[in-house]
Image (cartoon, rainbow, N blue to C red):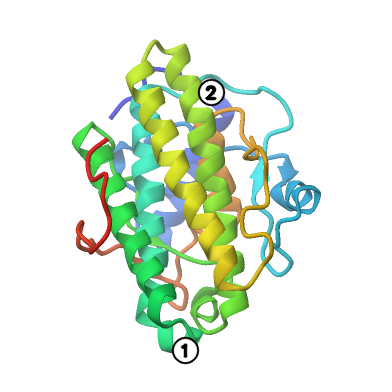
Amino acid sequence: MESKDPVQPTVRAEIAGTAQSEATNPTVAPLASHRTGHHIWTAAISLGAAAVASGLVFSTLPALAAPTGDHGQMTSTADILSIARTAEQLAVTFYSEGIKHHQQLGIQGSDLAYLQAAATEEQIHMEFLAENGGESLTDIFSFPEGHDTFKNLSLFVQTLEQLETAFVAAYVVAAGEFAQQSRPDLAQIAAQLCGVESEHRALGRDLAGLTPATNVAFEIALFNHVSDAFSALKAGGFLSPSDVNRFKYEPVSNRFPGVTGIQP
């Protein structure tokens, strides 16, 4: 799929470099061939700094990154949908692994039901984005701390908070970019998705007993463009699979008892 926006030379070089690395490393699943023409994210300041300012907890994780200035061009509608779909696949993968290792994490009862509902909600998001033209850029992911992420509750929740903070920030800027492209319908969808991701972040904090679980008055606007979010995830270690740090997206059920609002 070709982006409607021209690809900047520096971004094109990054795409080419990543593709060459994947071609020579059989342990890294190649991104979809359609990725050429998608903006691949650049980074400047760390999410860690924003996290400290807002009271978030990312002490043991690599910092995600956000741009310092309004560099690059607006992310096209098609690219936003594809980036969001891929992020939702990452989210499903994360929650699925948490469910699989819930006993080791010490997550039971209503807390386990939260993870199961979250996985279902992310699956529903992914299916909506796919039905509306979003393409999967990759279905193989990694985590900054690899399999250890799912052996320690504190590390699991820190990863959850890092991911959900990035997802919220991506949907915040998506709403603005959709509006600028005269797509108020999709801007509304972005707001609806952002609200659910915010709930996930708060409930994740509650899993670890962090108080207050809802600790921001305004969600943090980390990115200038949705395309920046992809670079942030890449720099944060979520898109660097290897033989020992490789997690494949597998679809889960799009139904779970108590989950409503299946359609926007």
| Residue 110 in sight from this viewpoint | yes
Q: Amino acid at mark 1?
A: Gln
Secondary structure at badge 1 equals helix
15 or 102: which is nearer to us?
A: 102
Percent of width and height locating residue 132: 23, 32
Taking the spot 24% from the left edge, 32% from the top edge, the residue there is: 133
176 or 210: which is nearer to us?
A: 210
Residue 185: mark: none
Residue 261 relative to residue 54: left or right: left
Relative to 135, is 152 above or below? Answer: below
Quarter occupied by the C terminus: top left
Q: How many numbered marks, from 0 up?
A: 2
Relative to 11, is 33 above or below? Answer: below
Taking the spot 42% from the left edge, 59% from the top edge, the residue there is: 24
36 or 75: which is nearer to us?
A: 75
Counting other residues with Cα less than 10 Å from the Cα at mark 1, is it few (<14), some (14-19), or many (20 or more)? few
Taking the spot 48% from the left edge, 21% from the top edge, the residue there is: 177
Secondary structure at badge 2 equals loop
Percent of width and height locating residue 137: 34, 45
Taking the spot 61% from the left edge, 34% from the top edge, the residue there is: 223
Q: Amino acid at mark 2?
A: Gln
Quarter occupied by the N terminus: top left
Counting other residues with Cα less than 10 Å from the Cα at mark 2, is it few (<14), some (14-19), or many (20 or more)? few
> Which residue matches tag 1?
104
- Mark earlier in primary sequence (2, 1): 2
**Quadrant of residue 224 in the image?**
top right
Percent of width and height locating residue 86: 36, 47
Residue 184 relative to residue 154: left or right: left
> Which residue matches tag 2?
8
